[in-house]
Image (cartoon, rainbow, N blue to C red):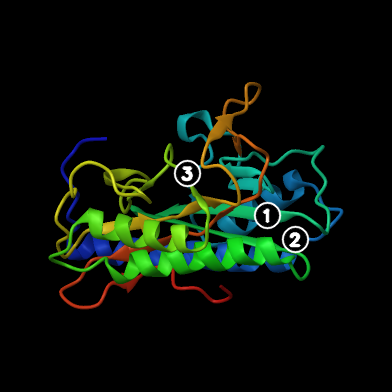
């Protein structure tokens, strides 16, 4: 990924808005279609059908040879989980879905985590903290701020809820390609990052764990990322357009 942030044209923003809206629609439909007893492969196939109904295509399928229509990560899986016919969903599971739709030169990318029943106190804290961290980051996505302002806001909330912050995977620019500069960490690193200017589109996506921040990648599929200690993880993501005024959430939720 090159260093310079991408500033999108008005025509590109129109296409990105449409892609983001369609992606959010798929994201919001899937939790209502998921059922205990279903396999994660079944859920991935349902997602593929919904994406095709938009008139677009999966932005993930085939991306660096990724084999799924969406990413489905269960319990201790943080990101990049692959739908499997041997993975049956249980009513005790929590499920993270990461959805991408490409259409007419625009790309949408968004994620959420859901469960099938009322969650125990620790999982409820994980969900609430990750959602709140996302919204705190979005509130700082204003022209004149820097990427670090977003990172700082996310980190502050994650620490408030005593959650581990995944460092190996971060938010990013998105719009006409799935991944564009700049990177948007969920923690404060070295330097303040690029200045935010109108026309930038950012995916802000806290990936927070109930336990350690450390993660490992599956040695067999080379995609699925899990928490090192087996603790549950949550992932919420929105696409945000930097404007002259308030940040515009392009994947504004219907159900989150």
Furthest-right residue in this view: 37
Viewer can see residue 17: no
Q: Circle 1 is placed at which residue position?
A: 95
Mark earlier in primary sequence (1, 3): 1
Q: Position of residue 167 (x, y in %)?
A: 42, 40
2 and 1 marks in contact (CB < 8 Å): yes
Judging by the rendered image, the residue that carries numbered circle 2 is 34
36 with respect to 22 (left or right) = right
- Please name the residue shown 28% across and 67% down the image: 14
Q: Which residue is mark 3?
A: 166
Measured as percent of width and height from the top left, residue 212 is found at 56, 42
Q: Nearer the viewer, mark 1 or mark 3?
A: 3
Of callouts 2 and 1, the N-terminal one: 2
Mark pair 2, 1: CA separation: 10 Å
Do labels 1 and 3 touch, CB within 8 Å? no
Residue at figure coordinates x 66%, y 22% from the top left: 220
């Amino acid at each position: 990924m090159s260093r310079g942030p991408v500033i999108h044209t008005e025509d590109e923003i129109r296409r990105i808005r449409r892609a983001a809206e369609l992606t959010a629609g798929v994201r919001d439909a899937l939790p209502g279609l998921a059922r205990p007893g279903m396999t994660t492969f079944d859920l991935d196939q349902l997602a593929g059908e919904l994406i095709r109904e938009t008139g677009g295509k999966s932005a993930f399928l085939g991306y660096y040879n990724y084999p799924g229509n969406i990413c489905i990560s269960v319990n201790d899986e943080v990101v990049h989980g692959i739908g499997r016919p041997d993975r049956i969903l249980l009513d005790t599971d929590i499920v993270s879905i990461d959805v991408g739709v490409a259409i007419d030169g625009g790309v949408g990318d968004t994620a959420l985590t859901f469960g099938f029943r009322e969650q125990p106190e620790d999982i409820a804290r994980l969900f609430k903290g990750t959602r709140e961290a996302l919204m705190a980051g979005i509130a700082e996505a204003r022209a004149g701020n820097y990427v670090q302002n977003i990172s700082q806001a996310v980190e502050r909330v994650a620490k408030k809820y005593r959650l581990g912050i995944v460092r190996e995977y971060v938010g990013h620019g998105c719009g006409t390609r799935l991944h564009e500069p700049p990177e948007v960490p969920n923690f404060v690193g070295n330097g303040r990052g690029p200045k935010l200017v109108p026309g930038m589109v950012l995916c802000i996506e806290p990936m927070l764990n109930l336990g350690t921040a450390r993660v490992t990648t599956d040695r067999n599929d080379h995609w699925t990322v899990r928490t090192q200690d087996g603790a549950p993880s949550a992932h919420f993501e929105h696409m945000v357009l930097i404007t002259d005024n308030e940040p515009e959430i392009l994947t504004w939720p219907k159900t989150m």
